[in-house]
Amino acid sequence: MLPEVDGWSVAEELGEKDETRDIPVVFLSARSDNSDQVRGYETGGVGYITKPFDPLALTETVRKVLERARAGERDAIRHEWRRSIGS
């Protein structure tokens, strides 16, 4: 948990500013309910990893997200995630 602010607020703030809107946000959280993933999606995230996590899987997820975001596939990433969480 972040002190004084939460990840949802940070993601929303990033999404509101032109200079940070395109930063792909992957949530890393102890919150594992489907509703938490839905909230992450709704705040503009592109992925969600729950703790405890495998460091190698985290690295691979971030690498894939960055590659795909650079290739202009941000909307596709979000669409795939949305389908996987049933939102």
Image (spheres, rainbow, N blue to C red):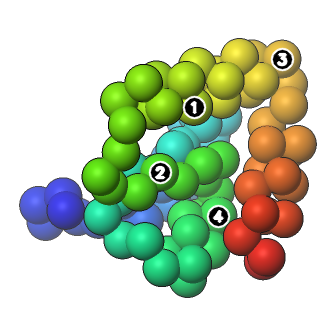
Residue wearing tag 4: 41
Query: Residue flagged by tag 4: what amino acid is it?
Result: Tyr
Where the C terminus falls, by quadrant?
bottom right
Residue wearing tag 3: 71
Query: Residue flagged by tag 1: what amino acid is it?
Result: Thr
- 65 on left or right of 27: right
Q: CA distance from mark 2 to mark 1?
A: 9 Å
Element type where label 1 sits in the image: helix
Residue wearing tag 1: 61
**Image mark for residue 49:** 2
Instruction: Name the residue rendered at 57%, 31% in the picture.
Output: 61
Instruction: Name the residue rendered at 36%, 45% in the picture.
Output: 53
| Residue 72 picture quarter | top right
- Of 84 and 3, the residue lying toward us: 84
CB contact under 8 Å: marks 2 and 4: no
Q: CA distance from mark 3 to mark 2?
A: 22 Å
Q: Position of residue 36 (x, y in %)?
A: 49, 75
